[in-house]
Amino acid sequence: MNISFYTATTGAIQQQDRLDIHANNIANVNNFGFRAKQPSFSQLMTGPVTGIEDTLPRGVGARIEDAATDFRQSGLTGTERMLDYAINGSGFFALLDPTTGEISYTRDGSFTLSQLKANETVQITDPADPDDPYAEPTTRTEVQEVDHWYLSDGMGRLVLGTDGARIEVDDETAESANIPLLPVGVFDFINHDGMRSLGDNRLVPVEKNGNVGFGSGELVQGYLELSNADLATELSKVIESQRSFQYMLRMITTSDEIETTVNNLR
């Protein structure tokens, strides 16, 4: 069969995947701290490859090599909300999942306060027996569940502070309308390339990112970072992908017509 048929089929599939990436960028254009994906293509093999026992079939066309994350900083917008934080510069916020122990990283600083229960040993003083003039109060220890306020992302994950621990807020501060600047940690890696994306604008490092350290970015309270997905650019890429997809389908149709003509020859 004509090799152009397979080339066009491969191209159509890859353009569909490319369209999905840009559509996801558009869907998150208003999400704070979102990092856009940029697909890159590589050429498939254009000649046969000699294997151990036989010649392997050759590849045709191109495929998406990677959908790299664009880590360029976007603009900051003021919210006048004291639990909103942004990073001016390089770095990430760290989020701890208390149920799994997983630590993920994000640029979305729209935080809130979550109340969690913890077991604590407290001392309880029992009053003396009023009927016994010689009796004295007794003290005993007891384990009780005590409520604590922690800074979180509102999804059950806790924000880590500059000391790498959870940020606890006392009751008086939690009930105050004017919450002071909390010691929110800014963390970073030597290399950002290849960080694995999770849901909710979160990233987790891979081996080549190196060890985590403190970031050089400045913590800004009352601001959030905008998405770095540019709507005009993404829409133009969508149109480009749609046109390329149409060309691939036209190529498939043309290849089929050629094969039909050849089959009808007598």
Image: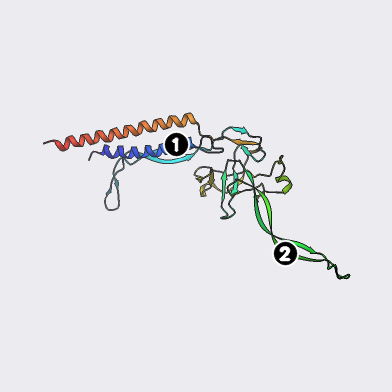
Q: Are marks 1 and 2 in contact (CB under 8 Å)?
A: no
Could you say whether the residue bearing mark 2 is in a helix, strand or loop?
strand
Residue 193 circle label: none
Q: CA distance from mark 1 to mark 2?
A: 56 Å
Residue 36 at x, y = what percent? 50, 37
Q: Nearer the viewer, residue 11 or 120?
A: 120
Residue 81 at x, y = what percent? 66, 37
Residue lying at 67% horizontally and 39% vertically, measured from the top left: 82
Q: Nearer the viewer, residue 245 or 210?
A: 245
Residue lying at 35% horizontally and 32% vertically, measured from the top left: 244
User: Dividing the image into 4 quarters, which one contains the C terminus?
Assistant: top left
Query: Looking at the image, is mark 1 or mark 2 nearer the viewer?
Result: 2
Could you say whether the residue bearing mark 1 is in a helix, strand or loop?
helix
Q: Nearer the viewer, residue 165 or 224?
A: 224
Q: Is residue 250 left or right of residue 116?
A: left
Residue 39 at x, y = what percent? 43, 38
Q: Earlier in the sequence, mark 1 or mark 2?
A: 1
Residue 61 at x, y = what percent? 33, 38
Residue type, label 2: Glu
Residue lying at 47% horizontally and 30% vertically, measured from the top left: 233
Residue 189 seen in this snapshot: no
The residue lying furthest to the right in this view is 133
Q: Is residue 143 above or below residue 147?
A: below
Residue type, label 1: Ala
Question: What residue is pinned by disc 1?
Answer: 23
User: Dividing the image into 4 quarters, which one contains the N terminus?
Assistant: top left
Q: Is residue 139 left or right of residue 37?
A: right
Residue 251 seen in this snapshot: yes
Q: Residues within 10 Å of mark 2 (few under 14, many from 20)?
A: few
Residue lying at 86% horizontally and 71% vertically, measured from the top left: 132
Question: What residue is pinned by disc 2?
Answer: 142
Q: How many marks?
A: 2
